Image (cartoon, rainbow, N blue to C red):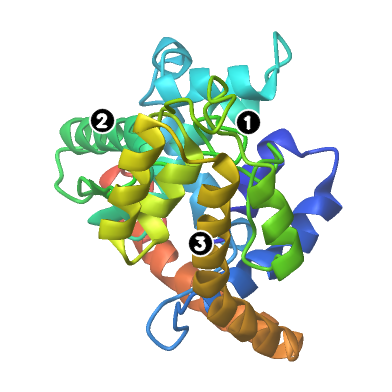
Amino acid sequence: MIADAQALTDNAENPMKVRENILEVALDYLAVGIDPLKTTIFIQSLIPALPELMMYYLNLVTWNRLKHNPTVKQEIQQKGFGEAIPAGFMVYPISQAADITAFKAELVPVGEDQLPMIEQTNEIVRHFNRIYKTDLLIEAEAIIPKMARLPGTDGKAKMGKSLGNAIFLSDAPEVIEKKIKGMYTDPTHLRVEDPGKIEGNPVFDYLTIFDPDQEAVQSLKDHYQRGGLGDSIVKKRLNEVIQTFLAPIRTRRLQFAQDKGEVWNILRRGTAHASSVAEQTLAEVRKAMHLDYFS
C-alpha cells in the first residue's frame, strides 16, 4: 500500500508533494524486488472501502485512548504540532486499522515504533467481534526486523524523508558519500586516540545491518572502543558497504523509471484488485453491523 491518504494528515496544504511521491514510492518498491506479479501494489486513497471502515471503527475507540497512543504522542512531538494537531492525524491509527483489516492481514511488517498501532488495531478487532458477535475480523501479528528502526543519519531514533536525515534508494553515489561523511558519530570522540562509543552511533548501526563481513565489523567496533580508530576510516568502510548494497537497486530503479507509464499501469491494476478485496470485507462488516439494508 502506498499510503497517500495518511501522508495528507500532515501535508494537506501540499497535495502535489504527496502526488509526486506516489511514483517515487512505487519505483522504490519495484527497485528492491517487490514483484507485482506476486504482490499487489495499490494506492490507499483510491480504495473507497477504507474510509468507510474507518468511520465504523471510530465509534469503537475513545478519544482518550487515541491521545495516549505512544506512537501518536511521539510523532506529534516530532512534527511540532503544538495545539494545532490535525484531527486526521489524531485518528490515523484507526485508518491503519482499516488498512490492515480490510485485507484480513495476518502479518504486518513494521518498525518497533509501530507496535502500538498493531496493538490498537487488535483492540478494535476484538471490540468489533465482541459487539457484533462475529469472528469476521482477525488479529494481526507484527513482524519486526532485527534492527527494529533504522536510525537517522543525524543520530535521531528515526530515519525519515521529512526529517532530512535519510539516505534514499535513488541517491547518486556522490550524494550517498556526502551524507555518510556528515553522519553523526560519538560527539565525545574528539581525537583518534580517544576511546569511542558505538552505542547510539548510527555509523556502527548501519554497518551491523548492511556489512556482510560481521567479523570485520566487530574488529572495527573493538578498535573504536579502545581508541586509535578515526571516524573517517569507519565512514569510509560504511560508504563502500552502502554503495555496494544500493548499486543494483539504483540500476533497477532507473530501468523501471524509463517506462513510467507501465509503473502507473501496475498501480492501476493493483488498485483495482485491492479495491475488490476491500469491498468484500466491507460488505461482510456491514452485514455483521446489520447495515446491509437492501441485501
**Is 230 placed above or below 216 here?**
above
Q: Nearer the viewer, residue 119 or 254?
A: 254
168 left or right, relative to 18: left
Q: Residues within 10 Å of mark 1 (few under 14, many from 20)?
A: some
| Amino acid type of the residue tagged 3 in the rendering | Met
Q: Residues within 10 Å of mark 2 (few under 14, many from 20)?
A: some
**Residue annotated with mark 2:** 123
Q: Nearer the viewer, residue 141 or 176?
A: 176
Q: Nearer the viewer, residue 67 or 169?
A: 169
From the top left corner, tell me how far across and down residue 73 is, in percent: 50, 17
Choose the circle earlier in sequence order: 1 or 2: 1
Q: Nearer the viewer, residue 208 or 87?
A: 208
| Amino acid type of the residue tagged 1 in the rendering | Gly
| Amino acid type of the residue tagged 2 in the rendering | Glu
What element does badge 3 sit on? loop
* Structural distance between the alpha carbons of marks 3 and 2: 22 Å
What element does badge 1 sit on? helix
Residue 81 visible to an observer of this rendering: yes
114 left or right, relative to 12: left
**Is 221 placed above or below 19 here?**
above
What element does badge 2 sit on? helix
**Residue annotated with mark 3:** 1
* Structural distance between the alpha carbons of marks 3 and 1: 18 Å
214 left or right, relative to 276: left
- The answer to the question of whether label 3 and label 1 lie on touching residues, with beta carbons closer than 8 A, is no
The residue lying at 14 percent from left, 47 percent from top is 135
User: Would you identify the image quadrant in which residue 37 lies?
Assistant: bottom left
- Viewer-side label of 3, 1: 3
Choose the circle earlier in sequence order: 3 or 2: 3
